[in-house]
Image (cartoon, helix red, strand yellow):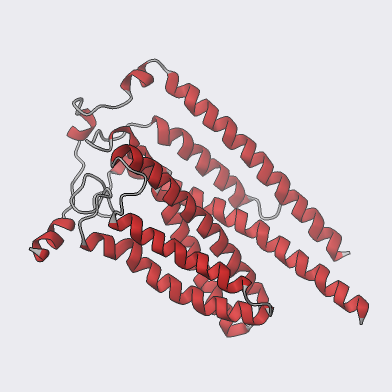
Amino acid sequence: MRASWWKILTIALLAYTLTAGLLLDVPRLPILNETIRALHFHVTMWFGMIIMLVVAVVYSVKFLRSNDLKHDDLAIEFTNAAILFGVLGIVTGMLWAKFTWGDYWSGDPKQNASAIGLLMYFAYLVLRNSLTDVHQRARIGAVYSIFAFAAFIPLIFVLPRLTDSLHPGNGGNPGFNAYDLDSKLRLVFYPAIIGWTLLGTWISSVRVRLRRAERKIEDKLINQVS
Amino acid sequence: MAFSMQVMAQEKIEITEADYQNTRVEMADVMRSEGKIYVLVGIIAIVFAGIVVYIINTDKKVSRLEKLLQE
């Protein structure tokens, strides 16, 4: 296994998240009850997604500056893993909403905004796949990715806070955010963010390596013919 | 009205030590006192171990493929 120290860290952090996240004391809050532990599993999906999207934007910019497809590999695969996390985040959110708000989808501002955000990234995949030239695909994908990210952040973080959202931490509902997150919750929450993000990075890196191996094989085949 | 709603949306609720002792809020206390929570943690740990083994195997396979391509 290549560069294995951070992979060991991933496993350790996630093992800690799964056990401590279920066993450690949590504040007893109305409405949330025991589901406050979703902080370590649902909320971390969105944090992981955003961190990976930042990485994708960085590599998109790098691609635009260098025109080197190696950067595009990282941009697309980090976006893929980010989308996986986003889908998991929205599905876990729906399950939680069914038992807390009474319906899988109640059109809450937070739900709608995250759905729009995810659709933007689905469109990114469709856009890329509709182009056949790899360089054109990479260039248009990179530009789209930068603009999509710039729209994604206000959609997820700003707009739901400007209206009355039922989501914990918004609209005066019991919950938590960067300013009042409890110190005992933080003990698991921060390692959980790092752990899940590293897992996404691991998945992305394996797929990047497969992508590069594939390109190598294709190049060899083309060189054989000519 | 719109302004006051905006102000309300920015209010933050602090978690205090009392929130840890508040027995009026229902939690899975029975499940914990019976020790069944450890069964659940065990199950999740086994599933996680299986997934980890699978990812490591896939990673190694890709490494082998890369070596093959370099030759």
Quadrant of image for the C terminus of chain A: bottom right
Q: Position of residue B53 (x, y in %)?
A: 67, 39
Judged left or right of residue A200, residue A164 is left
* Front residue of A168 and A106: A106
* Front residue of A172 and B41: A172
- Is residue A187 in view from this perspective? no
Q: Position of residue B65 (x, y in %)?
A: 81, 57
Q: Position of residue A29 (x, y in %)?
A: 23, 36
Query: Vertical placement of A39 versus A202: above or below?
Result: above
Q: Of all residues shown, which one is farthest toward the top?
A: B34
Q: Of all residues shown, which one is farthest toward the right?
A: A225
* Front residue of B41 and A8: B41
Residue at 86% across, 73% down:
A220
Query: Vertical placement of B63 versus A127: above or below?
Result: above
Residue at 86% across, 77% down:
A222
Q: Position of residue A56 (x, y in %)?
A: 53, 68
Judged left or right of residue A44, residue A164 is left
Q: How many marks?
A: 0
- Is residue A154 in view from this perspective? yes
What is the quadrant of residue A40 in the picture? top left
Residue at 61% across, 83% down:
A66
Judged left or right of residue A83, residue A69 is right
Residue at 50% across, 43% down:
A13
Query: Vertical placement of B26 versus A157: above or below?
Result: above
